Amino acid sequence: MSEKVAPLSQRPAWKALTAHAATLKPQHLRDLFKADPARGTRYTAEADGIFLDYSKNRITDETLKLLIELAEQSGLKQHIEAMFTGQKINVTENRSVLHVALRAPKSESIIVDDEDVVPAVHDTLDKMSAFANKIRSGEWKGHTGKRIKNVINIGIGGSDLGPVMAYEALKHYSQRDLTFLFVSNVDGTDFAEAVHNLNADETLFLIASKTFTTLETMTNAHSARDWFLASGAPESEIAKHFAALSTNEKLVSEFGIDTANMFGFWDWVGGRYSMDSAIGLSTMIAIGPDNFRSMLAGFHAMDVHFRTTPLEKNLPALMGLLTVWYTDFFDAQTVAILPYEQYLKRFPAYLQQLTMESNGKHVTLDGQHVDADTGPIYWGEPGTNGQHSFYQLIHQGTRLIPCDFIGFSKSLNVLGRHHDMLMANVFAQAEALAFGKTAEEVKAEGVAEALVPHKVFEGNRPSNVLLAEELTPELLGKLIALYEHNVFTQGVIWSIDSFDQWGVELGKVLATKILGEIEAPTEPALTNHDTSTANLIRRYRSTK
Ligand code: G6Q
């Protein structure tokens, strides 16, 4: 995509939205609903079994029209095509962005640098399936002849958050005689607690690292190797207990991992978009190759929806545009992700990386300072737990916090009335946020005059409700792809590169330097640091 777009503030739709926002802001959702009896059914869209009710947003037909014009003036359709056809849209790294190829059916072909990437994707999936089946069936034996009972994924960031989230999300479908653990933090406690009471001869480590150079992961991987060897296992048996998920064959083999047990992927898969690549091997071992493939089919269905559906019915595009609307025209700084599904407890954490590492940028594709706010802060917790802690602020605080509620018609663990109670809370929360409670309503309840203002709910607080039938592997794939493309839509509007992450580099470089100073045998001068940092390093050195 070399085509230049005008800065945001110069796009006609942006100017129109600025004027429109001023007329819309004083309007209350109560009035918008009153004025249009069909609003609650009209502002809905559905794709592949995911129903989106976006009627409780502070929008009108005019808002939608202008947001879609903005998408058009920002070249959204062209950018979508550019991504799906393998153009190098990650401009700062000169890379294609093809996580969509990871779930493309065998019959498709996607050409990158004159080569069709789809066959290699399926070869890797087949290799992963054979390996996963051997672990699941017990055919794969550890060095003492015992079967593998524990699978430990060692990775960080994109090589951790997706696998953890997917394992938790799909635990219902997992093989329960296998234990899955995830080690990411360089804090030794993470590793120590993971292997506590485990037998090394029943444990398989998956070293998940695209680059195979990441400090935390390599440190943990070496500790895993030491732990394994300290159990009395000979070095020659490492191959039975270590596999690598990586793009770096050379470093994998230098580490001592048999490259027959290496599952590869490609530079066009970004870390935070990699949970459906070889990085998902732990997920595949947990839920089995068939379930993994149905998760991929779910991803693909949402990819097709995003690529082919007109924007007014396009779920990811609508959600992305609404996020731009609140971020830039209502000064909303955050988005709350509120899954009413315990299995999705790590979904908000996963989305934090997906959204904030992608769109936490202030420089446009052509190197200018973006002339609007970008990437909101994503956060959240599963309901109903959050209702008893932070929802107070969402209901009665001074900030506008758009919420995404996620719920399912069927529970995977039917237990008395639990599920109806859970879902009643989804609908109640979205209703309370939108419509609130007026002073008149509070007074009519006989509340003492002095307490009335405290008990008023202003309402007019926006939310989306996403409703699906049941949390299946396929549905999870759709849900993740929905947010991937939602993030993509936002990035296109802001004209930023959603696929690089230069902002994580500086800290890494400084940490390496400081590590040398911390471990230096004689007191280092530290004159290259500010006085605060130098003082902290000195204090740490003298107290550690
Ligand atoms: C994700 C980022 C980052 C990355 C980790 C791990 O998009 O690039 O979170 O996934 O830094 O990198 P490796 O997989 O190379 O160890």
Image (cartoon, helix red, strand yellow):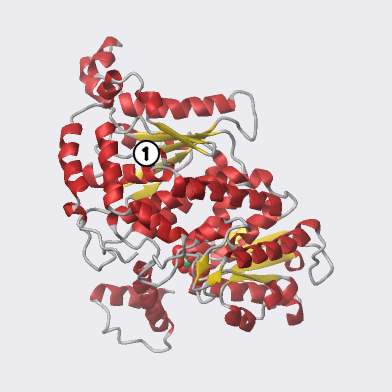
Question: In the image shown, does 519 or 204 lie closer to the viewer?
Answer: 204
Determine whether the beta carbon of the residue marked 1 sits less than 8 angstroms from the nearest atom of ligand 1. no
Front one among 39 and 65 = 65
Classify 272 as above or below 450: below
The total of numbered circles placed on residues is: 1
Task: Look at the image and tell me in which quarter the N terminus lies.
Answer: bottom left
Give the left or right position of residue 331, taking residue 108 as reference: left
Q: Residue 308, percent across and down? A: 45, 47
Residue drawn at x 59%, y 60% as measured from the top left: 182
Query: What amino acid does circle 1 point to?
Result: Glu
Residue 441, how many percent across, how many down?
Answer: 28, 14
Is 480 positioned to the left or the right of 538 in the image? right
Quarter of the rendering occupied by the C terminus:
bottom left
Residue at position x 68%, y 63% in the image? 128
The picture quadrant where one finds residue 5 is bottom left
Judging from the image, what secondary structure is the residue with disc 1 in? helix
Query: Is 154 above or below relative to 466?
Result: below
Q: Which residue lies furthest to the right in this view?
A: 145
Q: Mark 1 points at which residue?
A: 312
Q: Can residue 303 be seen in this view?
A: yes
Q: In which quarter of the image is residue 469?
A: top right
Residue 333 visible in this rendered orientation of the protein: no
Image: 350 above or below 259: above
Which residue is depicted at the point 36% across and 87% down? 523
**Residue that lies at the very extreme toward the bottom in this rendered image:** 522
Number of other residues with Cα within 10 Å of mark 1, as a class: few under 14, some 14 to 19, many 20 or more: some
Residue 126: quadrant of the picture: bottom right
> Residue 103 location in percent, x, y?
57, 56
Q: Which residue sits at x=54%, y=36%?
A: 49
Where is residue 315 drawn, in percent x and y?
43, 41
